[in-house]
Amino acid sequence: MTATAPSLLYLVKQLELSVRARLTDLVRPAGITALQYTALTVLERHDGLSTAQLARNSFVTAQAMADMVSALEGRDLIRRERNPDNRRELLIYLTGNGIALLAELAEPVRHLEDQMTGGLDATQLRGALTSAWHALTEPEARTAPPAEHRGQATK
């Protein structure tokens, strides 16, 4: 019997699990979790987000993000300020300590990315992954599968 190659979806999930485990080990000495690191890097790219926006961009629920924001604020890695356009909304910003922590972790994270990509061209891989992500997040990608594919997962 010939073994078939694992599906791309399976490989992507295995890669995600491996990256999360390695990232967890990498950021633990800094006293943060991989999810907290992700939230900080989201703010590094898009400072001044609401809790809901940060949750969506960090792949966690709003409740989990509320707890995370409290923890990160308690460590003086982020700060919250009233939105001048909507006084009921708080916007989240990196503090100097948050920026410094990300700078401290930048080289070890870059090393992990280099190890992960091995001999691959990282720029091409980043482009391919971004294209795959956009292909699944664009509105037209959310249409129903063709009739001949519906229901096959239950067989």
Image (tube, rainbow, N blue to C red):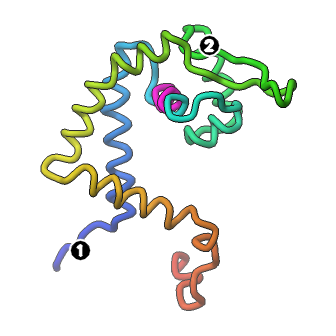
> Which kind of residue does numbered mark 2 sit on?
Glu
- Residue located beneath label 1 in the image: 4
- Kindly identify the residue that appears in the image at 38 percent across and 13 percent down: 30
Spatial separation of the CA atoms under disc 1 and disc 2? 48 Å
**Circle 2 SS class:** helix
Secondary structure character of the magenta stretch overall: helix
Span of residues in magenta:
35-41
- Residue 72: image x %, image y %? 57, 16
- Residue 29: image x %, image y %? 35, 13
- Kindly identify the residue that appears in the image at 42 percent across and 56 percent down: 130
Decide: is 65 above or below 72: below
Quarter of the picture holding the N terminus? bottom left
Horizontal arrangement in the rendering, residue 32 relative to residue 145 (left or right): left
Label 1 Cα neighbours within 10 Å, binned few <14 / some 14-19 / many ≥20: few
- Residue 151: image x %, image y %? 58, 81
> Which kind of residue does numbered mark 1 sit on?
Thr
- Kindly identify the residue that appears in the image at 60 percent across and 89 percent down: 147
Nearest to viewer (mark 1 / mark 2):
2
Horizontal arrangement in the rendering, residue 5 relative to residue 10 (left or right): left
Residue 37 drawn in magenta: yes
Residue 44 drawn in magenta: no
Q: Earlier in the sequence, mark 1 or mark 2?
A: 1
Q: How many marks?
A: 2
- Residue 82: image x %, image y %? 78, 20
Closer-to-camera residue (44/150): 44
